[in-house]
Image (cartoon, rainbow, N blue to C red):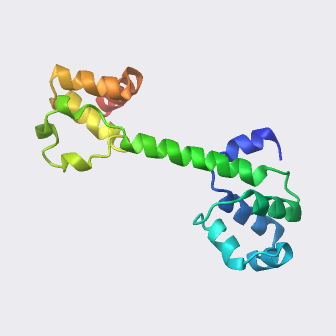
Amino acid sequence: MTIKMLENIKGMHPGFFLERKLKEKNISKGRLALKINEYPQTLSAITKGKRGMNTALALKIENELGLPEGTLMFLHIFYDIKQEKLKRIETSKPNLSKLRKILFWDTDFNKIQWHTQKKAVIERVFDRGNEKEKAEITRFYGKETVDKILKEYSAHAY
């Protein structure tokens, strides 16, 4: 497996990668579990993304499947990094004291998902907001992101 290939799957749960490898090699989870002396339920939970990978198990699986040493732990580490970044993004918010709740009259202000709904938030604030609100949204999302979304919005508005 090349570094370029690993870059392409970086952030994927190692269990999803393992599931794909097992299908490619036409090996059942049960058969692999027996060969590496593990419980089938353990492999099943990992391939469903419900359980993480540990180093000892990763080495056994890699050895049995002929994968380069460290592949599964590489994926696991970058999966953990991706999950942590997503948590941080989901908890970050603009300075809400600078935004009037009335701008979002049709939604629960406390339940706005500022990152997944950024397009709607930017369009709303730039349609109906004041300069202070526009400045806060620009600070929060960044001028480049705001400009891009507003350009797309104005192209579709007419």
Residue 82 in sight from this viewpoint: yes
Tell me if residue 35 comes above or below residue 87 in the rendering.
below
Snapshot quadrant of residue 94: top left
Location of residue 63 in the rendering, given as x and y in whole percent from the top left corner: 88, 61
Tell me if residue 130 comes above or below residue 104 in the rendering.
above
How many numbered badges does the structure rendering display? 0
Tell me if residue 127 comes above or below residue 112 in the rendering.
above
Location of residue 32 in the rendering, given as x and y in whole percent from the top left corner: 81, 74
Q: Determine the residue positioned at 34% across, 28% down.
A: 140
Q: Give the side of residue 56 with respect to residue 157, left or right.
A: right
Residue 11 in sight from this viewpoint: no
Nearest the eye: 129 or 76:
76
Q: Determine the residue positioned at 70% across, 65% down.
A: 19
Snapshot quadrant of residue 27: bottom right
Quarter of the image for the C terminus: give it. top left
Location of residue 84 in the rendering, given as x and y in whole percent from the top left corner: 51, 45
Q: Determine the residue positioned at 45% across, 46% down.
A: 87
Nearest the eye: 112 or 43:
43
Snapshot quadrant of residue 123: top left
Q: Give the side of residue 15 with respect to residue 4, left or right.
A: left
Q: Determine the residue positioned at 79% across, 39% down.
A: 3
Location of residue 117 in the rendering, given as x and y in whole percent from the top left corner: 33, 43
